[in-house]
Amino acid sequence: MHFSWRRFVPLATALLLAGCASQPSHVELAPLPVASAPAAPLPATVDETAPARFRIDFETSRGPFLVEVTRSQAPHGADRLYSLVKAKYFDGSRFYRVVPGFMVQWGAAADPAVTKAWDRTFPDDPVKGTNTRGAVTFAALSQPDSRSTHLFINYADNARLGSLGFAPVGTVVKGMENVDRIYSGDGENPDQSEIQEQGNAYLQKQFPRLDYIITARLVP
């Protein structure tokens, strides 16, 4: 099922931002080098079953961070995340939505053709974990079974997201200080429909300061 990305964001944004109305001013950052687009293969018909526990090493333009996933916490989400990382889907992916005090979101491939190939939903998981600071969670629509490739990392303890169906799939266990440093100066300004259609070509031209994932790899 295909749908507009414009609503493919955490549903509690307005609710949580109401409590974060006074955000700190953004620090001006020097332009960062541009990551090359990955050559990710098309996805399999069904996501591969992930191991019971695995770790992902994210190398980014702000430094590395390490995510640990326990499959029993959110099996469907873990399987999709495992499959995306194995396919090198996130290489070159921009952090296109950054809200200090709330979350940082990514999930569009560098190449829009790859994004569209992976734009297939998977079933919801029961909420077993809590959206505490550092929790990694798939974004979703307001309808059931609508998760696809977009994730966010919680900057704060956003426990109320659990009541809205957002099931954490993993946790940043190392390098959260680098996640905190991800460029936030463009906020929520990047147009998600343009990202869908143009990928990094649009973001590099209109929002060149956005930080990005250099590589995301499973840790042996």
Image (cartoon, rainbow, N blue to C red):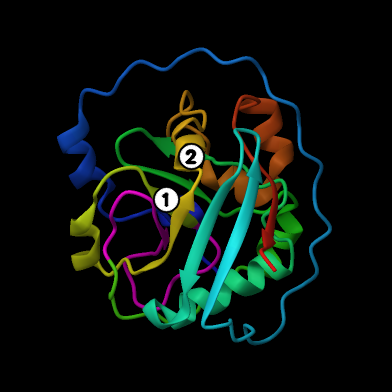
Above or below for 23 versus 66: above
- What kind of secondary structure does the magenta stretch mostly adopt? loop
Please identify the quarter of the rendering in which residue 87 is found.
bottom right
Q: Amino acid at mark 2?
A: Val
Instruction: Single out the mark in the foreground, 1 or 2.
Output: 2
Q: Label 1: how many residues lie within 10 Å, few (<14), some (14-19) or many (20+)?
A: many
CB atoms of marks 1 and 2 within 8 Å: yes
Residue span colored magenta: 130-150
Q: Label 2: how many residues lie within 10 Å, few (<14), some (14-19) or many (20+)?
A: many
Q: Looking at the image, is mark 1 or mark 2 earlier in the sequence?
A: 1
The image's mark for residue 76 is none
Please tell me how many numbered marks the rendered image carries. Answer: 2
Percent x, y for residue 45?
Answer: 68, 86
Q: Amino acid at mark 1?
A: Ile
Percent x, y for residue 48?
Answer: 64, 84
Answer with left or right where residue 132 lies relative to residue 26.
left
Above or below for 163 versus 214: below
Answer with left or right where residue 74 lies relative to residue 122.
left
Above or below for 121 versus 176: below
Farthest-out residue, left? 19
Percent x, y for residue 181?
Answer: 49, 30
The image's mark for residue 179 is 2
Answer with left or right where residue 164 lies relative to residue 10.
left
Residue at 62% across, 51% down: 58
Please identify the quarter of the rendering in which residue 62 is found.
top right
Residue at 34% across, 54% down: 10
Percent x, y for residue 208?
Answer: 66, 25
Q: Nearer the viewer, residue 8 or 25?
A: 25
Q: Which residue is mark 1?
A: 153
**Looking at the figure, which quarter contains the N terminus?**
bottom right
